[in-house]
Image (tube, helix red, strand yellow):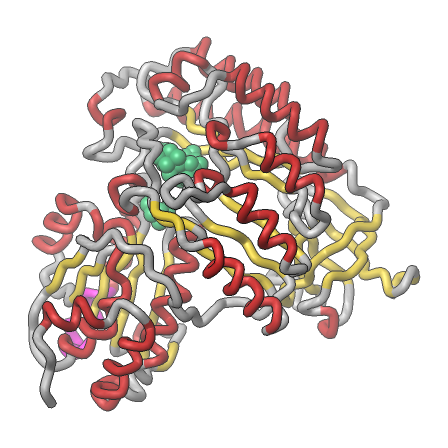
Amino acid sequence: MHLPDLEIAKKRNKSDNKYIELKENYEPVLKGKKYFLRTYGCQMNVHDSEAIRNYLEALGLENTSDVNNADVIVLNTCAIRENAKDKVTGFLGKCHYLKKHNPNLKIVIAGCMSEQPDVVNEIMKKHQYIDIVIGTHNLYDLPKLLIEKFQKQVIEVYSESDEVIEGINYTRDSKYTAWVNIMYGCDKFCTYCIVPYTRGKERSRKLESIVDEVIKLKNEGYKEVTLLGQNVNAYGHDIGETFSHLLECVAKTGIERIRFVTSHPWNFTDEMIDVISKYKNVMPYIHLPIQSGSNKILKRMNRRYTKEEYFELFTKMKERIPNVAITTDIIVGFPSETEEDFKDTLEMVKKCEFDGAYTFIFSKREGTPAARMEDHTPMKVKEERLQKLNELVNFYSHASNQKLLGKEVEVLILGESEKDNNKVYGYTDTMKLVNVNGPKSIIGEIVSVKITDAKSFSLDGDYVKEGVLS
Ligand code: SAH
Ligand code: SF4
Ligand code: F3S
């Protein structure tokens, strides 16, 4: 079989049509082989995995959930904190064992770890059996590289393109709720964060192309889309567009539910608040990371807002968007965080009464400015702070869930409940998880549910059929 020159292929297979050309040429090499895909990290990676799945399946590979049976293992990695990296290196031990017993097994490292040259070097030295390392910007090269790999032994590392790719196909995890990438990368350079280095600069997709994708999803029966970006509300500044305009255009498609993550407080405009409150199909739920309640730490994090500015925005949202739920991210133990700074964070949690929060201990990422800052706080103190913070955060999320007791809420039912397969589960408009007593036939529907119990992280409820409990 003739393989085109690598350089030419790299330029050629950037759009899906060209990719099909490639598939037709090489399908026989991979047909019937099995792939195992594991995803680490954020929604961006979850959605990238849907693209990876599509590439693999278009080549004739079949999914397996048993790693022992795989011909190809793809690890879509995350680099946000050290423990994300540890999880991947831990799993690589298993991969090494499998490869020893099956030398034809191909191991692929994708995702954010692949975009860190030092980490890649370290891993490649230690795990020389890895076949492909592919960057977040070059996923579309995966089919080409895999085909090559099954024919000859070379290691390829890619990460140079900053193009916005339109028309990617996805094998989506759900038939009812879909991720829609609206932009890639991040320009914020918060001093602790690796994302601007692993995902590149901010690039927005074309507005028409996003709206077309949403219309297509709606026509396929999807009830909900989540607009996705590291900094979703910075959308458009590079192409003369705004997020509020995009959100309004997406709302006008009439799709039943629209969500968006993650918003940066610095980019949140009044126009966005107007659109969220005006359109019923834009869900009243905002994930608005605060990171710290101390102005000194916020400054050192390069977050571009003070706690006062955050609270002003927060209050405006609460006043103008009926029943809005607001969740957040918080880091404790940032270099030079004192007990006073930490108290300021607790104070902000008390003032805001967040509906939920993801909390983290600062993790040093090589190459970021914060990695060079002096940090004298012992880990034990950081762990105590995290525990204290979690207690407070859980108190408020429990209180916010309690407010729904006895109420009827609308829930998009997504599938069988993991804990109890006699139940189904779904999310309220405010993104609260509900385990529902109800028939499987309501999966994929937006239904009324009467809330019967409220915990910190989830709710229980009964399906209400046209005003009557089922
Ligand atoms: N783009 C989003 C999310 C980025 S990653 C945003 O800007 O909010 C998700 C969360 O991980 C961040 O909000 C932050 O709270 C946390 N995080 C990022 N880097 C971290 C680090 N080095 N150590 C600990 N937590 C970190
Ligand atoms: Fe990281 Fe900050 Fe960008 Fe979020 S906004 S991805 S925390 S650099
Ligand atoms: Fe991790 Fe990359 Fe997302 S570092 S959190 S997978 S953008």
13 w.r.t. 283: above or below = below
Say which residue appears at 18% left-offset and 78% top-offset: 147
In front here: 26 or 365?
A: 26
State the quadrant of the N terminus: bottom left
Say which residue appears at 38% left-offset and 22% top-offset: 333
The segment highlighted magenta reads 95-105
Residue 468 in view here: yes
Q: Residue 106: percent from the left, percent from the top?
A: 20, 72
Say which residue appears at 21% left-offset and 53% top-offset: 114
Q: Residue 166: percent from the left, percent from the top?
A: 37, 63
14 w.r.t. 397: above or below = below
- Quarter of the figure with residue 81: top left
In this rendering, would 394 be left or right of 31?
right
Which residue lies most toward the top here?
Answer: 340
288 w.r.t. 151: above or below = above
65 w.r.t. 371: above or below = below
